[in-house]
Image: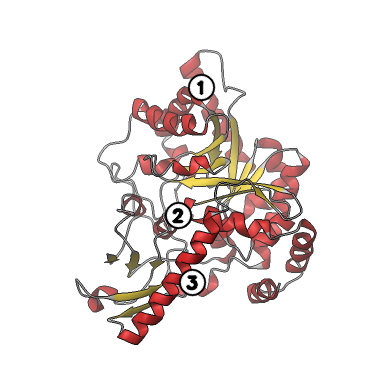
Amino acid sequence: MILAVQELKPSDTASLDKKNVLALLTETGGITSHAAIIAKSYGIPTVLGIPHLMDIVKHGQTAAVNADEGIVILDPDEEVADVYEKKCEAFRRDRQDAQTFQSRQAYTGCGVKIDIGLNIAGVADEDLQAAHYTDFVGLFRTEFLFMGRDTLPDEEEQVSVYRKVLECYKERPVIMRTLDVGGDKPLSSMAIPREENPFLGNRALRFCFTHPDIFKSQIRAAFNACAFGNLWLMLPMVSSIDDIRKAREIIAEACLEMDGDKGISPEVKIGIMVEIPSVALVAEHAAKEADFASIGSNDLCQYVCAADRMNSAVEPYYQSYHPAMFKLIRDTVSAFEKEGKPVSICGELAADILALPVLIGLGLRKLSMGAASVAAVKRAIASLSLAKCEETAAQVLECATAADVKKLLEEK
């Protein structure tokens, strides 16, 4: 079936029947909203922000959907249906070809190894099947354990969930993002005050600072589970060096409460998401404070371009190819490499085939994405050479506009 709704919350998207939902249409939301990202990670074609959708569609109506171009045709005639059926068949053949790369280690054509990570929101067996063909978990969205329920999960429940993922990946890193709520991810179990600008408000790490009991509970659960795998803790919405230091203090307090005088286990790395320009601009200092970094390109683009990722009216201003984006990525990678610390990217840009040469050319060797993108990305990487990637990246950094960048990449 094709599911058409007014709005879909991220927690609703995470619980969709992946086998029976052929496409997803919504009246509100943006292409990089969390609902859209999760749907894409499941391989569900999605078109969001369709004006007056619910006034137009009818139950049982036939539709042709082209999510790549944002096209929805209701009640297509036989000629249109035939065109779309041929497109679907070509898409299926291309996907089958890409699948031959899925279980391979990713290397460029010149032999540079690229680690491919998995972004996950759930821990059902089907969500973790990608452990067989990915190198690490680049983004474990732990907030979905807290959302869509009347009570917060206790530590025992959290330990059980975290343990399942850690055991699945064994010695491979599992980058667990600490509670990232707010924005388009509310907590139904708490009365959180409404904010005029929630994406600029008390969300993610800021929320944890104002609710240290919840933050400490999660930290204790994570450290109780860390013996079952290779746990890396990642702090979201870090805007300053002070944020990193304050978070470390709270984490240390939680560990002391749990272990007496043992403190933070040196085996657990504590890193940051680079998704606010202010911390990207002081990356050389952040790299001294954090054990690793992961570039969250979706929010980074939102803040760089001052374009609400949930607002389809400003979608043209949300430019993931903006030269400023690539300059901030370059500076972050360079700063963390200088300190000998790992850096990855876990936003939608990591799975963007057109952007791959730039990311690799800028020095990224760890890319994390939804399971549905892994095979195609590995195939694309195999066709690249490092020298060409570095040449392309240098040219992109000289571009003036996102349109210039896109034109350059399409001509390559």
Percent coordinates x, y for residue 99 in the rendering: 52, 55
Residue beneath the point at 58% across and 22% down:
265
Percent coordinates x, y for residue 28 in the rendering: 35, 68
The residue where tag 3 is placed is 315
Circle count: 3
The crowding category of the residue bearing disc 1, from other C-alpha atoms within 10 Å (few below 14, some 14 to 19, many at least 20), is some
Residue at far top of view:
260
Q: Secondary structure at mark 1?
A: helix
Which residue is nearer to you in this view: 294 or 40? 40
Quadrant in the picture for residue 340:
top right
The residue where tag 1 is placed is 227
Quadrant in the picture for residue 323:
bottom right
Q: Amino acid at mark 3?
A: Glu
Q: Amino acid at mark 2?
A: Ser
Q: Secondary structure at mark 3?
A: helix
The residue where tag 2 is placed is 41
| Proximity of marks 2 and 1: CB atoms separated by less than 8 Å | no
From what the image shows, is residue 234 above or below residue 183?
A: above
Point out the tag, 2 or 1, that comes first from the N-terminus: 2
Can residue 67 be seen in this snapshot? no
From what the image shows, is residue 64 above or below residue 330?
A: below
Percent coordinates x, y for residue 53 in the rendering: 29, 75
Residue beneath the point at 58% across and 57% down:
377
How far apart are labels 3 and 1 at the CA level? 44 Å
Which residue is nearer to you in this view: 245 or 260? 260
Residue beneath the point at 31% across and 49% down:
15
Tell me: 38 left or right of 101: left
How far apart are labels 2 and 1 at the CA level? 29 Å
Which quarter of the image is occupied by the N terminus? Answer: bottom left
